[in-house]
Image (cartoon, rainbow, N blue to C red):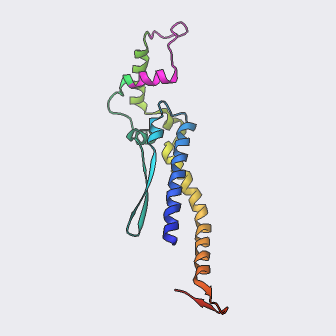
């Protein structure tokens, strides 16, 4: 019984965790097309007495989280698509720089990403995924003592039972 409750709680926690991960990306304004958010999933697996919670997402989610710097220049076409999605337009009349095309700006952005990584990590000092996990572990540590107490109390209550004649006996 306790094992089934644990499995249900783990699955519920997985759903809540994926929601928090998605919200973290939204709060940091790290959403262009929404593909990364749509890809975040949790799955509970059971093998014997061991239950595991697995979080999966598109590979570039891990890439952004750890601020890996690409060894090659990121694709300029993808940056152009991102610029379109974000509504970034060129206004040459107000620019003091001699940038002539959107493609030149996209190239400069790609080069900056290759040199420094992603701004999301640099601005916040910790990856978006790691931050959510760190906060959740802290919250779980605070709640674990109460959960353990409640589980032990529940087990004790379920251990003693009354017979039809009012006598109490211990079940094992």
Residue at the far left: name it. Answer: 72
Q: How many marks?
A: 0
Residue 130 in percent (x, y) is at 49, 47
The image quadrant of residue 51 is bottom left
Residue 111 in percent (x, y) is at 39, 25
Which stretch appears magenta? 78-99
Report whether 116 appears left or right of 93: left
Residue at the far front: name it. Answer: 164
Residue 149 in percent (x, y) is at 61, 72
Rendered position, 106 above or below 140: above
The residue at the point 53 percent across, 35 percent down is 123
The residue at the point 53 percent across, 48 percent down is 132
Rendered position, 8 above or below 132: below
Report whether 72 appears left or right of 30: left
The residue at the point 50 percent across, 54 percent down is 14
Q: Is residue 87 in the magenta section?
A: yes
The residue at the point 48 percent across, 11 percent down is 97
Given residues 48 and 164, the one toward you in this image is 164
Given residues 162 and 24, the one toward you in this image is 162
Q: Is residue 8 in the magenta section?
A: no
Residue 164 in percent (x, y) is at 64, 90
Given residues 38 and 96, the one toward you in this image is 38
The image quadrant of residue 80 is top left
Residue at the far top: name it. Answer: 93
Rendered position, 133 above or below 84: below
The image quadrant of residue 94 is top right
């Amino acid at each position: 019984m306790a094992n089934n409750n644990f499995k249900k709680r783990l699955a519920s926690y997985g759903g809540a965790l994926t929601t928090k991960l998605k919200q973290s990306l939204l709060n940091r304004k790290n959403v262009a097309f929404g593909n990364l958010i749509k890809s975040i999933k949790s799955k509970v697996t059971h093998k014997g007495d061991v239950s595991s919670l697995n979080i999966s997402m598109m590979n570039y989610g891990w890439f952004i989280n750890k601020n890996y710097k690409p060894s090659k220049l990121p694709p300029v076409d993808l940056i152009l698509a991102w610029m379109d999605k974000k509504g970034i337009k060129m206004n040459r009349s107000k620019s003091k720089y001699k940038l002539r095309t959107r493609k030149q700006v996209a190239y400069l952005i790609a080069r900056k990403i290759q040199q420094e990584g992603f701004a999301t990590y640099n601005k916040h000092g910790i990856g978006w995924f790691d931050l959510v996990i760190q906060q959740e572990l802290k919250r779980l540590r605070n709640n674990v003592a109460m959960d353990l107490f409640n589980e032990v109390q529940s087990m004790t209550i379920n251990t003693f039972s009354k017979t039809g004649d009012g006598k109490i006996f211990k079940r094992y």
